[in-house]
Image (cartoon, helix red, strand yellow):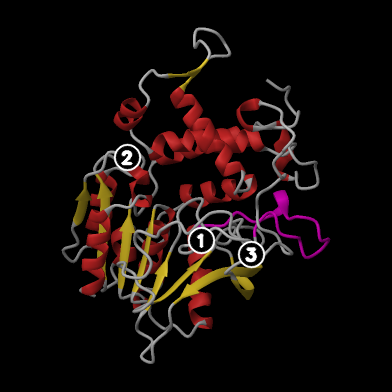
Amino acid sequence: MPAPGAPWAPDGIVSGELPRVTAAWRPGDPVGRRQFLDLASLPLEADAHGALDVTLAYETWGELNAARDNAVYVAHAFTGDSHVLGPAEPGHASPGWWPAIVGPGRAIDPERHFIVSANVVGGCQGTTGPAHPHPDDGHAWGSRFPWVTVRDMVTAEARLADALGIDRWRLVIGPSLGGLRALEWAASFPDRVQGIGVIGATAATTADQIAWGSAQAHAIHLDPGFRGGDYYDVDDGAGPHRGLALAREIAHTTYRTSAELDARFGRTVQHGDPLTPHGQFAVQSYLAHHGTKLVGRFDANSYLRMIHAVDTHDVGRGRGGAARALSAFTGRALVVAVDSDRLYPVDDARRTAEALGTGTEVTVLEAASGHDSFLADWPELAQEVAAFERDL
């Protein structure tokens, strides 16, 4: 294994191809399908900066109809972005992340809907984030970037809706962090949302979820390549890649299930003899693979901002609790839980539905793969979303 600070490569093997110091999209990179909106003085809920000038990166599909009542906002998950639909191409390292739900003939269809999705504030795929140049000196924001909340993210999304001429969303829907934002839309802008889709999410982050996030954050902070968050000027391979990969490995264990991992990998050996320090089980190789993949498309500082936003999420904060915060929302809500989700378990969904009131029920779907099931081509989820959308 390389010594701390040595160039990083997958599985600790030094190779001739080193990862960029950050995989964040930065001005000058291929634009892809992105469009951009400049937001002056976006108010920040708690950060000492008070406000932030933001360039919001977003994508759209379909057309807004004359009545302006067919707009759907698709909110991405923790390490997602605005590229909901479409191929991998210059500017987009990965194909669209939700083709099972969004696309021609799908539950959310560009032939019928005007579909919008934006990269969140603090993200790393086009919207202003830690890798972007600071307006004062042109160097990356790095450690200076604000600590944003889910409410800040939704405030930016509301400004985007204003710019696009959308007075009211037909539907705001998203999984995981996207589901947190759907709930925040219902609390912050209840008159601007006809329906919300909350998939694998909760009205307030629990201690257990904060604990998992804390371990991930420590993994990044303890990487010598992190350099306190100011690593953007170092050589390729010398950034906080080990810490970011390890954070993803920790997270990925919560995205899957014990039963699935045991069924897929058991005690299968990937290579060598696990009785020796250099042997490796197949499940260890699997986690390392997902850590490596994230290093190739994400940024460590943005990862920390996402953890902070999720940890501090509570729609009832300063509003008298979740039920009171959501009491002004009179639209309909689809609350979906995965029976095997160990990150956002079914009880979280039940508490969320109770806070929404008005007879909101939880739709519990069966899946073996836990929290990440929403990313799969999962007919049961697609059917639930399609039926809910039709009835709005």
Determine whether the residue tagged by mark 1 lies in a helix, strand or loop: loop
Which of the pair 165/235 is nearer the observer? 235
Q: Which residues are magenta?
A: 129-149
Q: Is residue 139 magenta?
A: yes
Q: Are marks 1 and 2 in contact (CB under 8 Å)?
A: no
Residue 144, placed above or below residue 30? above
Query: Looking at the image, which residue is at 76% across and 28% down?
Result: 6
> Disc 3 vs disc 1: which is toward the camera?
1
Q: Quadrant of residue 109?
A: bottom left
Specify the amino acid type for callout 1: Pro
Residue bearing mark 2 = 369
Query: Could you say where residue 223 lies in the image, as x and y percent from the top left?
Result: 67, 32
Drawn side of residue 136 relative to residue 130, left or right: right
Residue 219, placed above or below residue 365? above
The numbered disc on residue 87 is: 1
Q: Quadrant of residue 145?
A: bottom right
Determine whether the residue tagged by mark 3 lies in a helix, strand or loop: loop
Report if residue 218 is visible in the image: no
Q: Are marks 3 and 1 in contact (CB under 8 Å)?
A: no
Drawn side of residue 20 relative to residue 343, left or right: right
Which of the pair 222/233 is nearer the observer? 233
Residue bearing mark 3 = 50
Residue 157, placed above or below residue 220? below
Dot 1 or dot 2: first in sequence order is 1
